[in-house]
Amino acid sequence: MIAIDPLTTERLLDAMRWSDARAAIGRHSVRELWAYRELVYAFVVRDLQVRYRQTIVGVAWVIIQPLVNTLLYSGLIQLLQTRTANENVSNFLLILSGSIVWQPFAQGVQQTTLCLANNRNLITKTYFPRLLLPLAAVTTPLIDFAIGWMCLVFFSIAFGVPIHAAWFVAPLVALLVTLMSFAVGVWTSMLNALYRDLMSLVPFLLQIGLLLTPVIWETQVLIPEKWRTVAAINPMVTIIGLFRTAWFDQPAPTLAMIVVSTFSLMIVLFSGLWFFRSHEDLVADSV
């Protein structure tokens, strides 16, 4: 288990202890976020320790969850005697590739939604840039993606998929997934701090998102060509499409889809940052 250096933790707490919880709220810059970077590391390590403490199988849950989902969906598709992918791709590998991209996104959104409410004691007593909490919350699911990627490599080799260099595009996909979960999370974290109903609504919305995103099906098979650009308003459609293009050598998302997804992601991200910072002064009283 990763441990935090006690001296580093104490120094960070000393720097925060004498600060007013409401001081300089909403005025922090990138330079200030960088100055508190060690605190992000401390939050990430703490979240990992809490997540796997007193668990029987520990990190194995990261593999068990997408594998079980893949087996269930593959069995359902087999019973329905339908195809959700082209004939050159196994349904099992198609669903697994979508699951290991979707799971870190969903996990990141769920953790980010709760990050302010779960740290109310810290928020109400000390000042630090509140944006550090969503940043830390979307970082821990990267471990899920890394382990899932290795799992996909194993099963791809077992299914006879030729190894090629494009498989190592994974860090770029991980960056896009993290950015997407952060963009959604800055909205949901602040909304959940103000209105606790969102804590129950987010899992339901993620279930709907799972069905609307090509996790268990392939965009080129189920979406008519004229509607694919509209579907790209959901950036996860294009992110999963790019990942499968690199993995299975499938047709890449069109330039129009990439442009629409990029524009949509930027709108969600920058509007979320604006909303977060404009309501940041209310967090100490709301949580």
Image (cartoon, rainbow, N blue to C red):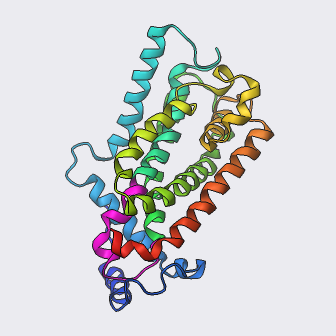
Above or below for 93 versus 255: above
Above or below for 237 versus 263: above
Task: Please provide percent x and percent y for residue 69.
Answer: 40, 29
For the point 50% across and 40% down, the residue is 102
Magenta region, residue range: 111-130
Task: Please provide percent x and percent y for residue 257.
Answer: 74, 39
Is residue 157 among what the camera can see? no
The answer to which of 160 and 95 lies nearer the viewer is 95
Is residue 101 among what the camera can see? yes
Task: Please provide percent x and percent y for residue 84.
Answer: 58, 19
For the point 59% across and 54% down, the residue is 175
Kindly report the secondary structure that dominates the magenta region of the rendered protein. Answer: helix
Assign the N terminus to one quadrant of the image: bottom left
Q: Quadrant of residue 11?
A: bottom left
**Residue 286, magenta (yes or no):** no
For the point 60% across and 46% down, the residue is 170
Left/right placement of residue 77 relative to residue 260 reads: left
Task: Please provide percent x and percent y for residue 112.
Answer: 43, 57
